Image (cartoon, rainbow, N blue to C red):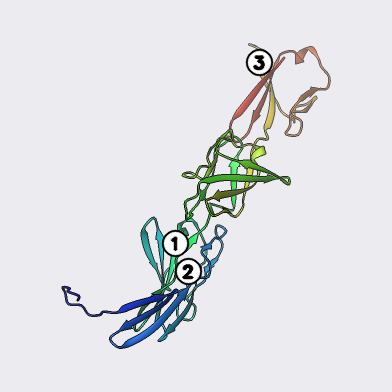
Amino acid sequence: MVTAFPKLKHVNWQRNISGILTILNDGAVGTSVVTIPLANYSSDYGKEVTIECTVAAIPDVNKIFWEKSVNGEKTSINARTLGIRGSIINNPSLTILNATLTDFGDYTCFAENTVGIGMSQTTHTDVRIGALVYNAIFGSKLYLHCDVTAKPKHTLVYWERKRNGLISTINYQAIGTTGITPNTPSLTLQFSTFSDMGTYTCIAANAIGIRQSHTTIVTITGGKYNCDTMKDESVRSITNITAEYQGISGANLTNPSLTIEYVTTSDAGLYVCIAVNAIGIGKKLRM
């Protein structure tokens, strides 16, 4: 017995046998089988990804829609949703045209006909990484984003860096890094240098197995200096010496050392090598 206010407009029953959903209402019988073939999907950042969905229903379906769930918050997706393709009767699969971190979540496909609504099992996103390429200035902090969703929950996270064919493992104990834990899987390089260049992969493990993200590339710029040399003759004068200065060689990017070709008494003094890059200015005294 059902009691409701306002009065009910519709009542039906659903029977689920081995994943086949049968809907019965007021003499009408319908069968709806909605299937997503894979339990996990992943995509390169900015690339296209298709979450497949197949529908077999009696009578024919008249509506397809999807639902995305992130931390219990659900969002409905249909053919009019921006940035997607599909989710229609002739093509129930969902294609995300430009995958970003906002597309992370659990997806369910729904098919509706005149006797009710059938739904697929939920498919879960995998390890996701923030960008295909990260670029940092020499000496700056660099944050590599990684999201992990796992059932059962993951218990281990680490990163791998591939450089010149060699693979290095980076875990939460690595000097000069933070993160790399189950709760904070992202990797932060506190002071990036040329040795940090390479291809990075985020890896997570749970009781079932190990999964990994797509790779991301780290490049480092800076570190080379625009160099000039200054001669300080104490109180008398200060002379800036660059590569264009007559009677010298060097004082340039490839050869910052200063060579005085014909030394005279006028060259006596205190010399300071000054190097400048995007980060700042460095000085070195030379007598």
Report the front residue among 237 and 89: 89
Looking at the image, residue 213 sits to the left or right of residue 113; the answer is right
Looking at the image, residue 32 sits to the left or right of residue 201; the answer is left
Residue 176, given in percent of the width and then of the height, sits at 57, 33
Going from the N terminus, do you reach mark 2 or mark 3 first? Answer: 2
Going from the N terminus, do you reach mark 2 or mark 1 first? Answer: 2
Q: What separation in Å lies between label 2 and label 1 (alpha carbons)?
A: 16 Å
Say if mark 2 contacts mark 1, CB within 8 Å: no
Q: Nearer the viewer, mark 1 or mark 3?
A: 1
Q: Which quarter of the image is occupied by the N terminus?
A: bottom left
Q: Which quarter of the image is occupied by the C terminus?
A: top right
Q: Name the residue carrying label 2.
A: 84
Please tell me whether mark 1 sits on a helix, a strand or a loop.
Answer: strand
**Numbered circle sitting on residue 187:** none
Binning the other alpha carbons within 10 Å of mark 1 as few (below 14), some (14 to 19) or many (20 upward) gives many
Residue 118, given in percent of the width and then of the height, sits at 39, 76
**Numbered circle sitting on residue 237:** 3
**Residue 77, placed above or below residue 236:** below
Toward the right, the furthest residue is 262
Binning the other alpha carbons within 10 Å of mark 2 as few (below 14), some (14 to 19) or many (20 upward) gives some
Please tell me whether mark 2 sits on a helix, a strand or a loop.
Answer: strand
Tell me which amino acid carries mark 2: Ile
Report the front residue among 83 and 130: 130
Going from the N terminus, do you reach mark 1 or mark 3 first? Answer: 1
Residue 183, given in percent of the width and then of the height, sits at 46, 44
Please tell me whether mark 3 sits on a helix, a strand or a loop.
Answer: loop
Residue at 30%, 88% in the rendered image = 27
Looking at the image, residue 255 sits to the left or right of residue 189; the answer is right
Toward the bottom, the furthest residue is 27
Q: What separation in Å lies between label 1 and label 3 (alpha carbons)?
A: 71 Å
Q: Name the residue carrying label 1.
A: 106
**Residue 277, placed above or below residue 148:** above
